[in-house]
């Protein structure tokens, strides 16, 4: 695969090194001569270094963007990332275009213009949220940029618990699908008549925001109050 | 006409004043509130501190009901991004970007944006006044 990168700072040079080590062809653009000089010493010699602005069509040409499978723009300036990515798409027809977004407020703009946007503040925020919910709901994986998740919930004993009920009895709403029940060493693929037991760990795919509903159904109470307590204690 | 101008430098401020004189509703946006001093007392539009790139901020400036949008900062990437937001997200009927550095002309064209090439406009005007027999004194001054 050939990846063209705009921005030779911490993020860009790390990305170039990592992708090169994995056997990909890489070109790297930066307008600062002193940065280019340093990168020429630091990076493997077959990384193509191009000095120029990513928002200049000629620079993109020199960096071979017309042949790139992926274009990534990772400078600290959102306007430069947006313009470079739009050019990669519009002038060079690159199919996969990824941008670093520095201000989370610009994220909707990148998305509206068809650019995959990665905002570190948004990602960190999500990770913190996932961490906070451990205990009631364990988020195993986030799908489709946080719009869905695979979660794990333990069925407790006591009143309100789903223990003893069948999957069909739970009347789960749209947007929640149970995919597996872990019971000791056993793995049960849940069907309507499968009964739940206390201590079961239930894995489900949910669309964003339905985790609470799943927790309430299986545990008899939501995790919201607990989660808020933890946030307060942590702050 | 409801006109939004991003960038209150020499071009943006002069354009804002001209808009006021023509009876337009003008909103000028700049990151530096000191830039608004250039508008003087003759300006009766609104000033807004901001980047001109934030959708919430642009809504505040009335972009949803605006007739024309001008991106006139001294950064071509800011001008291109602002113009793209105005033209493609808010579908403003008339959007013009200032081309500050002529080496970005191909980029403006590749994005399909309407632009005015600052340097070329003044170069052509100067050339025309040289060729068009401007007064001798003027010629001496230029030379």
Image: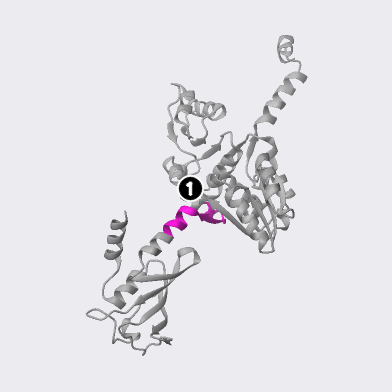
State which quadrant residue B15 falls in. top right
Q: In the image, B14: left or right of A149?
A: right
Looking at this view, name the residue that lies furthest to the top.
B137
Any part of residue A71 in sight: no
Looking at this view, name the residue that lies furthest to the front.
A41
The verdict on residue A111 being magenta is yes
Give how far across and how far down residue B64 sits, in percent. 46, 45
State which quadrant residue A3 falls in. bottom right
Quick one: quadrant of the C terminus of chain B? Answer: top right
Given residues B105 and A123, the one toward you in this image is A123
**Magenta-drawn segment:** A110-126
Give how far across and how far down residue A95 sits, in percent. 65, 60
Give the colour scheme shown.
one colour
Q: Which residue is mark 1?
A: A103
Q: Is residue B113 above or below residue A227?
A: above
Element under disc 1: loop
State which quadrant residue A176 falls in. bottom left
The verdict on residue A125 being magenta is yes
- The residue drawn where x is 40% and y is 59% is A128
Q: Is residue A26 above or below residue A214?
A: above
Please, which chain is the residue tagged with disc 1 on? A
Q: Mark 1 packing: few (<14 Cα in 10 Å), some, or many (20+)? A: some
Q: Is residue A20 above or below residue A58?
A: below
Looking at this view, name the residue that lies furthest to the bottom.
A193
Any part of residue A33 in sight: yes
- The residue drawn where x is 36% and y is 68% is A134
- The residue drawn where x is 65% and y is 31% is B118
Q: Is residue A184 above or below residue A21?
A: below
Q: In the image, A24: left or right of A158?
A: right
Give how far across and how far down residue A171 sits, in percent. 33, 81
């Amino acid at each position: 695969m050939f990846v063209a990168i705009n921005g030779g700072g911490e993020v860009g040079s790390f990305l170039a090194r990592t992708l090169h080590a994995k056997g990909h062809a890489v070109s790297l653009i930066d307008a600062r001569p002193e940065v280019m000089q340093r990168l020429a010493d630091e990076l493997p010699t077959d990384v193509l270094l191009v000095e120029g602005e990513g928002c200049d069509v000629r620079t993109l040409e020199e960096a071979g963007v017309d042949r790139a499978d992926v274009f990534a723009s990772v400078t600290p300036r959102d306007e430069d990332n947006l313009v470079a990515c739009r050019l990669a798409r519009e002038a060079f027809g690159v199919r996969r275009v990824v941008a670093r977004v520095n201000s989370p407020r610009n994220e909707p703009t990148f998305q509206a213009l068809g650019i995959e946007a990665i905002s570190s503040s948004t990602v960190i925020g999500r990770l913190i949220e996932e961490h906070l919910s451990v205990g009631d709901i364990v988020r195993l994986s986030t799908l489709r940029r946080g719009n869905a998740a695979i979660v794990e919930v333990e069925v407790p004993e006591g009143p309100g618990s789903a223990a003893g009920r069948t999957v069909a009895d739970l009347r789960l709403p749209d947007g929640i699908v149970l995919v597996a029940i872990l019971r000791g060493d056993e793995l049960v693929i849940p069907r309507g008549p499968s009964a739940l037991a206390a201590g079961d760990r239930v894995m489900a795919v949910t669309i964003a925001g339905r985790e609470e509903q799943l927790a309430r159904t299986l545990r008899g109470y939501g995790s919201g109050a607990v989660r808020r307590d933890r946030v307060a204690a942590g702050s | 006409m409801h006109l939004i101008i991003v960038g209150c430098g020499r071009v943006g401020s002069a354009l804002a004043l001209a808009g006021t004189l023509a009876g337009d509703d003008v909103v000028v946006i700049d990151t530096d509130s000191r830039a608004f001093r250039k508008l003087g007392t003759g300006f009766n539009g609104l000033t807004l501190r901001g980047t001109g790139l934030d959708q919430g901020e642009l809504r505040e400036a009335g972009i949803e009901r605006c007739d024309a949008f001008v991106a006139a900062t001294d950064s071509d990437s800011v001008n291109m991004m602002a113009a793209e937001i105005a033209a493609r997200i808010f579908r403003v009927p008339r959007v013009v970007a200032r081309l500050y550095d002529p080496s970005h002309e191909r980029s403006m064209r590749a994005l399909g944006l309407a632009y005015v090439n600052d340097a070329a406009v003044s170069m052509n005007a100067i050339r025309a006044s040289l060729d068009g027999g401007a007064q001798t004194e003027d010629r001496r001054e230029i030379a």
